[in-house]
Image: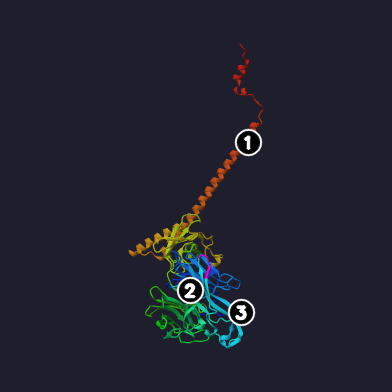
Amino acid sequence: MDPEPHTQRYTPYQVGPYIYDADGNLIWAGSPLYENRNVFDFRAVHSIGDEPHLSFVLQHNHEGDLGSGMIMSNDYEIKHQIKYPTDKGLGAFDIHEWNVLDDGKTGLGIAYRIHEVGMDSLGRPAEKTHVAAAGFTVLDLESGKLLWDWDGVDKIGLTESYRYGPESLPAASPGWDYVHANSIDRNAEGNYIMSMRFTDTIYMISGVDGHIMWRLGGKTSDFKQDFIFSRQHDAKFLESNGTHHVISFLNNASDEEWAGEVVSSVLIVELDATPGVMTAKVLRRYNRPDGQLTRLRGNAQQLPNKNMFVGWSEAGYISEFAESGELLFTARFASTRFNTYRAYKGEFIGRPKTPPDLVATVSGTNKVDLSTTLYVSWNGATEVASWRFYAQATEYSSPVLVGETPRVDFETMFISSGFLDWVRVDAVDRDGNVLASSAVQRTQTPKYWRSAAFASQDDLTPTNPAHLVSAATANSTSAALASSGYAPSTAHQQDVKEVLAVADDTYNLLQMIGGLLLFVMLLGLAYALFVSGCCGVLRRRAKGKQPYRHKGDEYGEEAIGLRSVPPQ
């Protein structure tokens, strides 16, 4: 494997769902969710409840998992994982579509069933072949229940395929992928449009009995067309009312081996399906900006402002057009190794349950010139405007604000002077509200400090963060003096640093002496209590060894005199 062209480094793959902001900065990396497992049709959903959600297809794997349609809440927790029932012959949850409808209760997926069919229509009546016949499913999001499914095996004949023909050899299971479905959508009337890539056709399917109402394109189109298209993807309703429809789709115009046109494009097509009329015309065409072909994958998304956002797939190439056709922007991955199946643009607010991640390290060559570098990120948070950094003298002491900086990328770096031993960060929104705080972390020190040119022979001593605030105040005062005409020399500034370092060492020494004195006092008190206790025990033992004496003996001569007086 060759290294990445732009870095000449061997970078590991990190496949999965990703969210970027309008400037191309990474917001959320979902590759750790499923250990770099492929995810398809990843998009924001706004029809489920009051909060935005995310939907995607988790691809089947080689360990027996047949894939799922996933619904994720905006805290990046899985809310629904929907699998196909095993007793319907639907196979894996197909990667091409997971379309959560506007009712917020229903989702559409694509499914394949394996059938053995005769080859009579291809002029070979004595032969049979297996085919993977495309269909679709209607699923309840809450329960995962299969509400309805459609199988096209008896509705789309082998002769409609551009992939297979009379010369094709019969195949064992799973057989021919002779239609290759790649999208499904439903209108308000309950009818469906489905794109089949290997027939170059978009089908209108009745939601009542499943019959094909009309075909657009392909060998048996029902419409008079002023355009051509082929190997298309992502057919969607933009408008639909009775016999009048406006749809959009990506006209790939090519596949891995063949091209019908010189450039891929997005088409917005108006259809009049009135019996006896049946016309189709292009309202707008958006050509791929670089003039190339998208031979695989891709999608077209009309935005609420009528702009057209397009995922051209290869190398993550995307573009946005104004309704007029003006190109507004393009972007692509730096690496050519990565592709997207589809790409979407839209509003989304992410509020992770996990706290921000913080890592801090200290560096420097002597005690008066140390600095602490803090790195902070919060995977999936969309509302962070800035970061506030705090330091503590000990794990449980009061935090001191040491700086604030705007969020500029997925990971933000902040550098503070001194060795900050215990650190924490707050995520702050545009209104100054704290969204979340990281855990208190201890700054990492180099394992081989002195081999990294640290000049001092003393042990590394953390800086009291309160002194940094004092130093910052001193620097502000110096800046004010400079603005009035006084500029402290470099030597003077170094002297200030050294004085602060001495003050910090003195403070730490006093803390150590104070702690030592307190320890000595406690030790003396314990010793006094021990001696007092021992003396008490010895007195009691000595008293217990004296001979018995009558109580009266305590009164001496007075008691003797009383006993000498004879009775009267």
Span of residues in magenta: 142-147
Front label number (2 vs 3) = 2
Which amino acid type is shown beneath numbered disc 3? Ser
Report whether 62 appears left or right of 368.
Answer: right
- Residue 541 in sight: yes
Could you say which disc has been placed on residue 173 in the image? 3
* Callout 1 secondary element: helix
Which amino acid type is shown beneath numbered disc 1? Leu
Color style of the picture: rainbow
Which label's residue is closer to the chain start, 3 or 1? 3
Front label number (3 vs 1) = 3
Q: Is-magenta flag for residue 144?
A: yes
Q: CA distance from mark 3 to mark 1?
A: 99 Å
In the rendered image, the quadrant that contains the N terminus is bottom right
Residue lying at 55% horizontally and 84% vertically, measured from the top left: 158
| Tally of numbered discs | 3
Which label's residue is closer to the chain start, 2 or 1? 2
Magenta highlight: main SS: loop
Which residue was labeled with disc 2?
Answer: 208
Q: Position of residue 309 (x, y in %)?
A: 43, 76
- Residue 299 in sight: no
Q: Quadrant of residue 427?
A: bottom left
- The reply to whether discs 2 and 1 touch (Cβ–Cβ < 8 Å) is no
In the rendered image, the quadrant that contains the C terminus is top right
| Relative depth, front residue between 149 and 334 | 149
- The 10 Å Cα crowd at callout 2, few under 14, some 14 to 19, many 20 or more, is few
Q: Position of residue 248 (x, y in %)?
A: 43, 78
* Callout 3 secondary element: loop
Residue lying at 53% horizontally and 70% vertically, measured from the top left: 31
- The 10 Å Cα crowd at callout 3, few under 14, some 14 to 19, many 20 or more, is few
- The reply to whether discs 2 and 3 touch (Cβ–Cβ < 8 Å) is no
